Amino acid sequence: MYDLTYILVVMLPSLAITGLASWMVQAAFRKYSQVGTRRGYTGAQAAQKLLDRAGIHDVRIVAHQGFLSDHYNPVTKQLALSSDVFRGNSIAAIGVATHEAGHAIQHAQAYAPLWLRSALVPTVGIGSQFGLLGIMLGIMMGFKALVLIGAVLFGAVLLFQIVTLPVEFDATARAKRLVVEAGIVDADERRGMDRVLNAAALTYVAAVLTSLLTLFYYLMRAGLFNNSRDD
């Protein structure tokens, strides 16, 4: 299954896309982690200020282990910030923390793409476990119906990733606007924050492109783009 076509169509482009996105976000975060803000807010304080301004008082902000492991859990209403972000008062820390606060605000305001993404979570687990397996078994057995079933299952993963894009872009847009409105950072300081968040957004685009390339390759191997199977 892992032939030269796979290497050229999937493996190398995926490594290049994801590697570049990962390098960009880490480089931007490390650079702007060294740049403090004039107001001196920590990431936790900045996130709390945005939540307070939005009238959200039932979300807990907690410290979390792991580099850039920051996330918002809509089930527990917990905003977990990595230690560098939670305690840091850098432009990078403010950017990441307020981005996650943007997700909490989305949740409170019933932002439709966030609701849809949450609804897709159960199907993602099934699709990631059985989607590609079904496609590969279908190819080996020459059973195109099984290939299509696998493609539908894997498509749930791809759909989740696609729906994630507007969720992440909107949270970033909220953070960029609200930090200035709330007086957390000045407009000129926000440029560095923008670079951190824009780089982070590329990781989600990279995930979508990688899944698209993977699905395209296996469907091509199954012969669904021509009249005969490519052996």
Image (tube, rainbow, N blue to C red):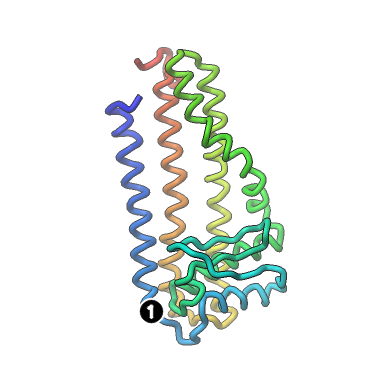
- The x and y percentages for residue 84 are 45, 72
Q: Which residue occupies the foreground of this view, 39 or 126? A: 126
Q: Residue at x 45, y 49 (%)?
A: 205
- The x and y percentages for residue 53 are 67, 77
In the drawing, does residue 169 fall left or right of residue 36?
A: right
Q: Residue at x 46, y 75 (%)?
A: 190
Q: Residue furthest left?
A: 4
In the drawing, does residue 146 fall left or right of residue 23?
A: right
Q: Which residue is mark 1?
A: 35
Q: Which amino acid, by three-letter code, is at mark 1? A: Val
In the drawing, does residue 18 fall left or right of residue 121?
A: left
- Could you tell me which quadrant the N terminus lies in? top left
**Toward which corner of the image does residue 110 lie, by quadrant?**
bottom right
Tell how many labels: 1
**Considering the numbered disc 1 on the image, is that residue within a helix, a strand or a loop?**
loop
In the drawing, does residue 9 fall left or right of residue 104?
A: left
- The x and y percentages for residue 77 are 67, 62
**Toward which corner of the image does residue 56 lie, by quadrant?**
bottom right
- Could you tell me which quadrant the C terminus lies in? top left
From what the image shows, is residue 68 above or below residue 160?
below
